[in-house]
Structures are given as C-alpha cells and as structure tokens.
Amino acid sequence: MAHKWYDIAVKSLDQGDEISKSYSLKLNDKDGYLLFSSKKVLFVHGEGLLRKKYELTFELPYEKIESVSKTGPYELDFTDVEGGRYKIKTFEISASIIEENFKTIPAA
C-alpha cells in the first residue's frame, strides 16, 4: 500500500515519468517529502500530527534548476533559473546523499 503523500506526487507526473527516490525532510522549514522523478523534483508538504493532510507545494523540472550547494552536514540550498531559493534540512541522512541525487539528474 502506497503512502498518501506518494500518491499525491504520482498524480502530478506526466506519462512515462516515475518516482525514483524520496526523502523525508524540511523544505523552506516545511515538513514533508522531497521526491525525485525522471523529469522533475517535487515536494509534498505534510501538516498535522494524527491526521496528516498532504499537499503538493512544489514541482520543478530539472532543466530549471540552476545550482545546488551543500551548506552543512544536514543542509543544502538550491536555486532555480527564475531566482527561486530553496533550503533543505534533512533529519536522518547526510545532505551529501540528496546533493548526489541532484548531480545525477537525467539529461533533458
């Protein structure tokens, strides 16, 4: 059985696109899940303790990512070509693992 947050992300994918990785973390101080698909990066925000509500709050095609930089052992920042800035804070895994996912993005 898939998780609700995963189902929400899958509904936003184009035909032929699929989720390859997902991580529980904070994006711009919001709890949720960062997902890497074959075409874009997505973030599903989760709110609530007992009855979580999930919402897709972010999706960005890989070709619009301008830069990614690790800013600490559990933090990294990335920017898009339109000047958007995003801060990732991880809970249990090194930011290097997520940074590596950005580096291995499929060619457009």
Image (spheres, helix red, strand yellow):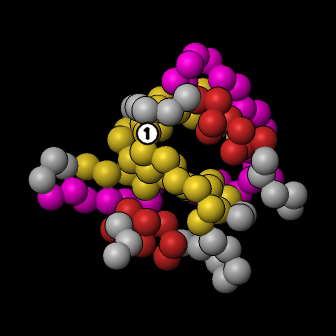
Residue pictured at 76% horizontal, 33% vertical: 67
Name the main secondary structure of what is drawn in magenta: strand
Q: Is residue 76 above or below residue 34?
A: above
Give the residue number, with chain letter if any, for mark 1: 25
Query: Residue 42 appears at what percent x and percent y?
Result: 55, 55
Let me know if residue 55 is in the magenta part: yes
Let me know if residue 47 is in the magenta part: no
Question: Is 82 left, or right, of 74 in this rendering?
Answer: right
Query: Residue 48 appears at what percent x and percent y?
Result: 19, 49
Crowd around label 1: few <14 · some 14–19 · many ≥20 (10 Å):
many
Residue pictured at 49% horizontal, 76% vertical: 11
Query: Residue 89 appears at what percent x and percent y?
Result: 47, 29
Q: Which residues are magenta?
A: 51-75
Q: Is residue 87 above or below residue 82?
A: above
Look at the image and tell me in which quarter the C terminus lies: bottom right
Look at the image and tell me in which quarter the N terminus lies: bottom left
Question: Is 37 left, or right, of 52 in this rendering?
Answer: right
